[in-house]
Image: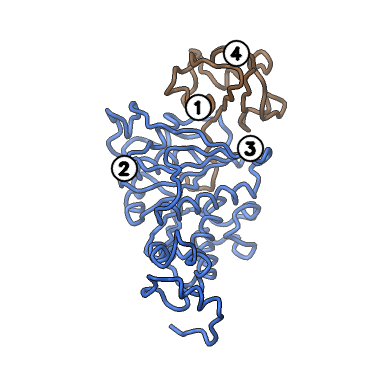
Amino acid sequence: MIKVRIPTPLRPLTKGQGEVDAQATSITEMIDSLNSAHPGIKDRLCDDTGELRRFVNIYVNEEDIRFLKGKETSLKDGDEVSIVPAIAGGSSCQA
Amino acid sequence: MLLPHHESPLVTHHRSLITDFMELTELQIQRYSRQIILSEVGGKGQMKLSKAKVLLIGAGGLGSPAGLYLAAAGVGTIGLVDGDVVDLSNLQRQIMHSTATVGMPKVESGRKTLSAINPEITIKTYHQNVDSDNILALVSEYDIVLDGSDNFSTRFLVNDACFFAKKTLISASMFRFEGQLTTIKPHAGYPCYRCLYPEPPPAGLVPNCQEAGVLGVLAGTMGILQASEAIKEILGIGETMADRLMIYDALEMKFRKVRRPKDPACPLCGENPKIKDLSMDYVVSCTI
């Protein structure tokens, strides 16, 4: 079982849960598994071509999958996956 | 400088621990005694703080708590840049401002508050928004920049400007109950913001704080962590956050850190950089 940390912006799709479980041996499988349980989450993580969006990072334990094998990065029981999107809130100082 | 009439035994004791305090006044020693006695700070560290120049981009939710603590710690020059005026809806989290300063430029309201805490430091104010025409001149005057802006266009612009000016950037951001923090100093071999997030979200895909809401005290937590990292960078102590991203979940009271590697394909600081200056249209490319 993989533990997946869901960021605040995606929690409406997981009924507010900050952590969900998934059965998967790769990130691709994990995304499909998440999407089955929480429909719509794949569209938030991947673009129309199925590639991960470039403002969403996925970490297996502490490592960014962009620097591992991307969506083909393998997962094993007990891994903790974090989904971390870019967020910008702070003040106001528009460019 | 007037000397205090009565010196407590504690102050005398603290002073005896200081080996390098000749440049500090009696009142400065008294004001900063609780941090001067830390061996990681000392008289030398206090002098480093007093000579440091820190620019706060945004005098709002993050800039407020960061500014308060940097001023209290004796950072010698603090710059505030923000084009907004104080609004009643800001006061839930922007604690540098008050009901009495509603309608006042945030940088002026901020100057009043910071000067009241510490009249010994210099507060410079810039009542303007940052853009690609003014940002390089702004950041060039400072040693460290704290980004507390509320939109991706500014975050990418600040990152790029600090890269070209070789300034250390402490970046924090927040959304509803979640905050992120990292230190950016590619001039020291570490990754930049574009190594972390190559592209901003397209227009309309991510709501901003005004639309999504933010827990006021989260701004306090994140701004204070920015101030803490800035002080560490000034003093050269502790573990840098330059190769880590910290994620704070206030609802679950969890802090996580992940690794943040340098991206060889980064268009700014990678092996074949495509961005050579600030001439791109940041607003069009990054508007949310």
Looking at the rendered structure, the kind of residue marked 4 is Ala
| Position of B92 relative to B210 (above/below) | below
- Please identify which colour was used for chain B in the image: blue
Crowd class of label 3 (few under 14; some 14 to 19; many from 20; radius 10 Å): few
Residue B220 seen in render? yes
Bin the neighbour count of mark 2 within 10 Å (Cα to Cα): few under 14, some 14-19, many 20 and up: some
- Give the residue type at disc 1: Asn
The answer to whether residue B202 is visible is: no
Mark 4 secondary-structure assignment? loop
Q: Please, what is the three-letter code of the amino acid marked with disc 2? A: His
Crowd class of label 1 (few under 14; some 14 to 19; many from 20; radius 10 Å): many
Provide the secondary structure element on which disc 3 rests: helix
**Pointer 2 and pointer 3 on the same chain:** yes
Q: Chain of mark 3?
A: B
Tag 3–tag 1 contact (CB < 8 Å): no
Return the mark for residue A57: 1
Determine which residue is flagged by label 3: B212
